[in-house]
Amino acid sequence: QVQVVESGGGLVQAGGSLRLSCVASGISLSISDVGWYRQVPERQREVVATISRRGSSDYADFVKGRFTISRDNAKNTVALRMNSLKPEDTAVYYCEIEEYRFGIRSPSYWGPGTQVTVSS
């Protein structure tokens, strides 16, 4: 059974930092594409950062230079380091995982999300 859990959210002042973690069980992040997404009420979920199973990362323009995605295969976790936070970064942040085993992509697995609130 696959379980995905995000943690590390909270309330922070503008300019501050947070580190989100995505912990997975029942699935191997070392052979997975992993993405961090965020969503605010009444708006579509949007991609924030991704890291491929080959280790390449990509970022949405609105977080480039501020956020860093990383993976720890030994701990089976993916982290999102968020610096220079802005009030507009306030959202629920989700982790999405797609495992590639024998060249076959698994269904997407999502965690329940973690709330990030940035005060001005």
Image: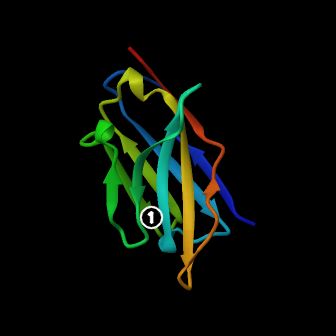
Q: Is residue 28 above or below residue 85?
A: below
Image-quadrant location for residue 86: top left
Q: Which residue, as the protein is rendered here, is positioned at the far top?
A: 120
Q: Disc 1 on helix, strand or loop?
A: strand
Which amino acid type is shown beneath numbered disc 1?
Asp
Q: Is residue 63 left or right of residue 28?
A: left
Residue 80 x %, y %: 42, 47
Q: Quadrant of residue 51?
A: bottom left
Left or right: 120 in relation to 108: left
From this viewpoint, is residue 117 visible?
Answer: yes
Q: Residue at x 32, y 39 (%)?
A: 63
Q: In the rendered view of the protein, which quadrant contains the N terminus?
A: bottom right
Q: Quadrant of residue 3?
A: bottom right
Q: Which of 18/103 is in front?
A: 103
Relative to 67, does residue 118 appear above or below in the rendering?
above
In this rendering, position of residue 20 left or right of residue 104: left
Against 23, is 37 above or below?
A: above
Farthest residue, direction left: 65
Question: How many labels, in total?
Answer: 1
Question: Looking at the image, is 20 positioned above or below residue 83?
Answer: below
> Seen from this angle, which residue lies furthest bottom?
102
Viewer-proximal residue among 49 and 45: 45
Query: x, y percentage for residue 43?
Result: 54, 29
Q: Which residue is mark 1?
A: 72
Residue 13 shows in the view? no
The residue drawn where x is 35% and y is 21% is 14
Residue, x 33% and y 49% (percent of image)? 59
